[in-house]
Amino acid sequence: MLRFRDIVLGTGPRPGECRLCTPAPESPVPVFRPAEEILADLAAHPGEIGAPVGVRLTGADPLAHPDPPSLVAAAVRTGAQRVALDTPGEGLARPGAADALLAAGARVFEVALLGSTEATHDRLAARSGSFDALAEGLAAVASAAEGREARVFVRARVTVCPHTVADLPATVMRCAELGASQVVLVAREGVDPRRALEWIGAACDTGTVNRLWVSVSGVPAEALGERGLHAVDPFEAVHAGSLP
Amino acid sequence: MSPAPRQKVALVGLSSVGYRSLALGYVRAAAQADPRLAGSSGFMTLDLDVSVDPWWVAFRVAGLRPDVVGFSVTCWNARAVYDACRLVRRSVPGAVIVLGGPEVSPIAEDVLAANPDVDAVVRGEGEETFPELLVALLRDRPLWRVEGVTARREGSGIVSAPDRPLIADLDTIPSPYLAGVIEPAEGSAYIETYRGCPHRCGYCFEGKGFGRIRSFSRERVQAEVDHLATTAGLRSFSFIDPVFNLTSDRLEWLAGMLEPHARRSVRLHTIEVDIERIGPAEAGLLRRAGVASVETGPQTVGERALAACRRTFDRERFVAGVEALRAAGISVECDLIVGLPGDRASDVLDGMRFAVGLDPGSVQLSSLHVLPGTDLWARADEHRLVFDPEPPHEVVSTADIPFADLRRLELCGNALMNLYKARV
Ligand code: SF4
């Protein structure tokens, strides 16, 4: 419903991928496109005044970029009122990082969680310390937002795969505790939705009773049955070329 | 030294933080000005936050040792008022407890039946009825005979006296500001220039309960504004009129009256407008009046719900209104209601898309409250509207949207609103 234009920063591991399903790429380090190219992309698609189109920095973890606030500031300069960062979220824990991003204009943080506990998340992400860093990073965002009286939106992406599925309700609960504004359950290609539906349904209901909206992506609304509304995602990602 | 009044009257307002009950101000100003009560009745007002513990409310009331306690009741404070009444009855056993306001007025007999600690309900406008009730108490006459009052009659249960006609000339009501009964709260003063509404939205009490439009005279409004403008620390006027741009003529008058104050940075707190009647000229007048933001519909874009609620919606004119206001630097808050009869989930989502797509500045989503005295309350069965019988009477399910989906729509909508607010 609120459109975000994807600006691809480069290539790298997709945040939130389950490493038991998808082995780490040979080079786990993100490779960024040249800065001029990224800036040219941003400038080619300015935000229209009066139309709520945001920019999402994606493709490679923006927090691994040498100067993330400058990317955000460049997006803001093009007129984007909302800049979203698609990131595993661990980099937010670096001292001063969250505040610098907010100062530059970042308002939407799309992070990834793979399990309800530190042990599960770190095992599936194949990175020890990842869960704690994410939790710390989100706390830093909340505190920076309070200090700057800024409104931020945290969208927690949870991959649905055979290794996460039974933990989905508890993971949604954990997202609520970490201060997420929305959860999106992303069914991985190849997952048999019928087998996962019961857990997805329970995860949606867990969100509802905790006043947290859970969207489901990758499963048709009809398959969700009486929970079909969970196919609605307020955040609409669009490719850079698909907007006027 | 003047003798102690025979009748001490405590008026209690339980309002949101930073608000004062204008209704109690009117009622007190009217009662104080009534010659039959002069010298025999003394008045005190307690303005408390609705979240205050009912024990503390009772403690404050008991400290005043009142003979009569009056509460103004809306759907938002009703539960708190009922809790307070229970404790006031026991801590000040001899006091007569009287309620008034839109929540209790249309269902006065039910309220008395459900709340044995309440003695009487003032129905409709209180500025004439409440002083009459106080006179009846002084003269030991039964309350159930007072026009506009519902009360207990010994041996016969609950009795409603006939309705009292609406006050024909609003200028006969003393101004609570000019009478010194209330002062601006937190730098803001409420002003009412008329009662009633030209529209008849099914979920609203204003149009149905107050019927035709009755205005305060321009001289009276001007006198209130001039008086308030001299109050130290006044930062904004808050007009509670249902439609600020009721007519072009009134809008021009208001802009002219408020412009000098706007120049001194006294702003207009968010006002309600009929946005479909706003073009560049009207937006310019609002700007002159010091308006920084306005509140408006569309409430829904679903044709079936618009018909069920007797509302109209002209998409093009609505968009033009938002654009004119934006061009004048005025922010717009678009309101949407979830759970209107006739709306399907897809209509609610369309409404959200429409409102957010306009990028108006602010979008507010709330659930339907089926309020006593409204058309939807009266026709709830016909519409198959299920709602909480307890205030604030939130909708539970509709003929088209089941209970669980209404909750889901609220959450999805709130997520969208929060995403919308997350901007530089
Ligand atoms: S909702 Fe507004 S326009 Fe409709 S009747 Fe009530 S006050 Fe009038």
Image: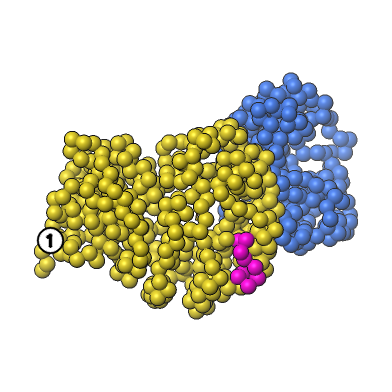
Chain colours: A blue, B yellow
Q: Residue furthest top?
A: A195
Q: Quadrant of residue B304?
A: top right
Residue B60 appears in the rendering: no
Q: Is residue A153 above or below residue A123?
A: below
Dot 1 amino acid type? Ala
Q: Is residue B125 left or right of residue A61?
A: left
Instruction: Give the x, y percent position of residue B404.
Output: 58, 32
Q: Is residue A220 left or right of residue A12?
A: left
Label 1: few (<14), some (14–19) or many (≥20) C-alpha neighbours in 10 Å: few
Q: Main secondary structure of the magenta part?
A: helix
Write the start and end of the magenta stretch as one range: B275-283
Instruction: Give the x, y percent position of residue B297.
Output: 59, 54
Q: Nearer the viewer, residue B413 or B303?
A: B303
Image point (77%, 39%), residue name: A15
Instruction: Give the x, y percent position of residue B190.
Output: 42, 64
Q: Which residue is mark 1?
A: B4
Q: Quadrant of residue A118?
A: top right
B72 part of magenta stretch: no
B279 part of magenta stretch: yes
Image point (68%, 22%), residue name: A198
User: In what quadrant of the picture does the C terminus of chain A appear?
Assistant: bottom right
Image point (55%, 46%), residue name: B309
- To which chain does the residue with label 1 belong? B
Looking at the rendered structure, the secondary structure element under dot 1 is loop
Q: Is residue A53 above or below residue B325?
A: above
Q: Is residue B269 left or right of residue A162?
A: left
Q: Is residue A192 above or below residue B164?
A: above
Image point (56%, 32%), residue name: B403
Residue B208 appears in the rendering: yes
